């Protein structure tokens, strides 16, 4: 039986299609870290970010052109879109990509688990009715302890081989914090069709990043890009950015945010497995323990009364 969610959208319930779409989303976003690692072998980080955003925007633009929808005209809405574009796309995409120049893809997936913890913590102070209880506070503490353990244990092993490892890890964490801040900001924006908002935000993000992206890549180097780089960029832009946005909002409408929160547990695991299978990455025992502690923290922080 269909039921409305708190925002008034028609929720169809969790069926096999919802589970299939959830795994599609986990596969796309969990594999993105490995694809970034591959593309960074031949592309500057900022160039990769600009191309990814532009491709994702083109996918959504084509979809909305077919549906005949129009973008909102209210100046306040566009002010929110601009803030979200900067803090939700441009900054975190660049910081995470910059971090992955050194940090393995699987470890990046684990570090990104801090986002839901940041959301719960910020919501406690900024959103009415979102006060965190003892269980949520314990989850936040556990999650940050897991991240600290991951940074300390991994840094000691790899610092000798990779200079700047800790600073790159902190860059990824800062990108994850940007995502959390953006979610809080988005909850306060004027009510908009979420898909239209995504089109506007991706468009602004692509406009901001595409010029420095092209300037960072010498013109003569484009012809030398290998097929693996081209394939990675295409999958990142078209599928992991554009199509994944469509799947995300489809799941929000049909299954709800609570069901969608399962991806917070699945994406780090997927990222670690993909990095191990396709890139030969190895997560040391301390890293596995840190991941379990972080996921425990995410579970506690997301607990409902």
Image (cartoon, rainbow, N blue to C red):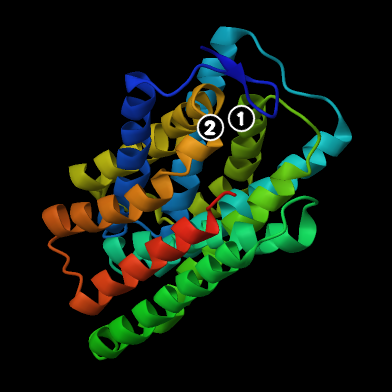
User: Where's residue 155, x and y in %?
Assistant: 32, 85
- Identify the residue shown where x is 61% and y is 44%: 205
**Nearest to the observer: residue 299 or residue 204:** 299
Classify 10 Å Cα crowding around label 2: few (below 14), some (14-19), many (20 and above). Answer: many
Labels 2 and 1 touching (C-beta < 8 A): yes
**Residue labelled with disc 2:** 57
Q: Residue at x 87, y 34 (%)?
A: 75
Q: Position of residue 258 (x, y in %)?
A: 52, 39
Number of numbered discs present?
Answer: 2
Query: Which mark, residue 199?
Result: 1
Describe residue 27's horizontal placement relative to residue 55 as left or right. left
Residue in the picture at 39% in, 25% down = 18
Residue 121 seen in this snapshot? yes
Answer whether residue 226 is visible to the viewer in this image. no
Residue 185 x/y as whole percent: 73, 50
Q: Is residue 48 above or below residue 243?
A: below
Name the secondary structure under disc 2: helix
Instruction: Identify the residue shown where x is 57% and y is 42%.
Output: 206
Q: Is residue 23 above or below residue 142?
A: above
Mark 1: secondary structure: helix
Q: Nearer the viewer, residue 214 or 299?
A: 299
Residues at marks 2 and 1, CA–CA distance in whole angstroms = 6 Å
**Nearest to the observer: residue 206 or residue 265:** 265
Extreme-front residue of the structure: 305
Query: Which numbered disc, 2 or 1, marks the residue that appears first in the sequence?
Result: 2
186 relative position to 98: left or right: right
> Residue 9, percent across and down?
64, 20
Asked if residue 11 is positioned above or below residue 252 in the image, the reply reads above
Residue 8 vertical placement versus 92 (above, below): above
């Amino acid at each position: 039986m269909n039921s409305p969610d708190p925002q008034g959208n028609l929720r169809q319930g969790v069926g096999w299609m919802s589970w299939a779409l959830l795994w599609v989303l986990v596969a796309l976003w969990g594999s993105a870290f490995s694809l970034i690692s591959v593309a960074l072998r031949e592309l500057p980080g900022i160039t990769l970010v600009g191309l990814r955003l532009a491709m994702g925007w083109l996918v959504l633009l084509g979809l909305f052109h077919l549906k005949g929808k129009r973008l909102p005209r209210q100046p306040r809405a566009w002010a929110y879109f601009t803030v979200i574009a900067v803090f939700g796309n441009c900054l975190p995409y660049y910081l995470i990509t910059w971090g992955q120049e050194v940090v393995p893809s699987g470890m990046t997936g684990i570090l990104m688990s801090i986002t839901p913890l940041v959301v719960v913590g910020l919501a406690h102070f900024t959103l009415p009715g979102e006060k965190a209880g003892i269980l949520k506070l314990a989850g936040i503490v556990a999650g940050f302890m897991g991240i600290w353990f991951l940074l300390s244990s991994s840094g000691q092993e790899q610092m000798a081989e990779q200079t700047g490892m800790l600073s790159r890890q902190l860059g990824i964490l800062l990108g994850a914090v940007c995502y959390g801040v953006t979610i809080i900001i988005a909850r306060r924006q004027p009510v908009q069709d979420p898909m239209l908002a995504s089109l506007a935000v991706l468009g602004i993000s692509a406009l901001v990043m595409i010029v420095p992206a092209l300037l960072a890549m010498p013109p003569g180097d484009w012809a030398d890009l290998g097929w693996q780089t081209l394939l990675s960029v295409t999958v990142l832009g078209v599928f992991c950015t554009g199509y994944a946005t469509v799947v995300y909002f489809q799941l929000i409408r049909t299954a709800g945010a609570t069901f969608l929160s399962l991806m917070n547990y699945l994406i780090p695991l997927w990222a670690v497995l993909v990095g191990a299978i396709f890139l030969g990455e190895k997560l040391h025992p301390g890293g596995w323990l840190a991941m379990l502690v972080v996921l425990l923290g995410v579970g506690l922080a997301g607990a409902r009364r």
